Image (cartoon, rainbow, N blue to C red):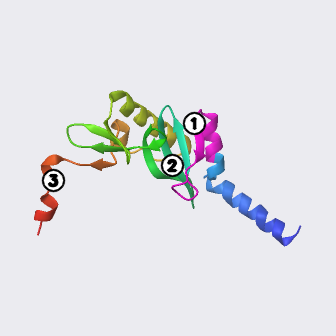
Amino acid sequence: MADGAIRASSRAMIKRKSGHPGLDETLDLLRAHGFETRPWAAIAGGVLVSKNGVGAVLAPTEGAAAAFAARPGALVEGELARLVDRGYQKFIKTPKYELPATATQLQAIHAFSEELKDLTGGISLYNEALGTTSDRYLYDRLKGREAAQP
């Protein structure tokens, strides 16, 4: 056997032993479970994974199948929206729009996040398993306090 073939064989064995499939295998698994995938130009190597009007961007990483390059959020006109909590209401925010989030959207984001973590072998944290967590928390009563701190 040639030296190059031995190295390739060793790499394949190491990859299998690590327990983490590559990004391509992960995307194949997600497609088999009804997820849609497409390249995401805003992030190098990023892939938008979506289902039921919710999406997240995955990117390849070392030592894991994939990592979130952009957290799960609602898709609004093809853009991935961030979830913003203003204390009294959660909002779906894109560069163009800011819309109040509905209970249906929050439930869809939560279900999508849990299914994606389950299929990719991600860690489900206690506070995230209870419900949808926001990307940002912007409370009016705290506005301006940052400048007042010594």
The residue type indicated by label 2 comes to: Val
Amino acid type, callout 3: Lys
* Nearer to the camera, 69 or 14: 69
| Residue closer to the observer: 15 or 36 | 36
The structure residue drawn at horizontal position 32% and vertical position 37%, both measured from the top left corner, is 99
Q: Is mark 3 on a helix, strand or loop?
A: loop
- Dot 1 or dot 3: first in sequence order is 1
The disc labelled 1 sits on which kind of residue? Phe
Asked if residue 3 lies in the magenta stretch, the reply is no
**The residue stretch that appears in magenta:** 26-46
Q: Name the residue under label 1.
A: 35
- Residue identifier under label 3: 143
Mark 2 lies on residue: 57
Q: How far across and down, in percent of the image, does residue 16 sit?
A: 68, 54
**In the rendered structure, which disc, 3 or 2, sits on the residue that comes first in sequence?**
2
Disc 1, SS: loop
* SS at mark 2 in the image: strand
Q: Distance between the residues labelled 1 and 3?
A: 39 Å
Task: Tell which residue pokes out farthest to the front in this image.
Answer: 96
Residue 108: x and y in percent read 42, 32
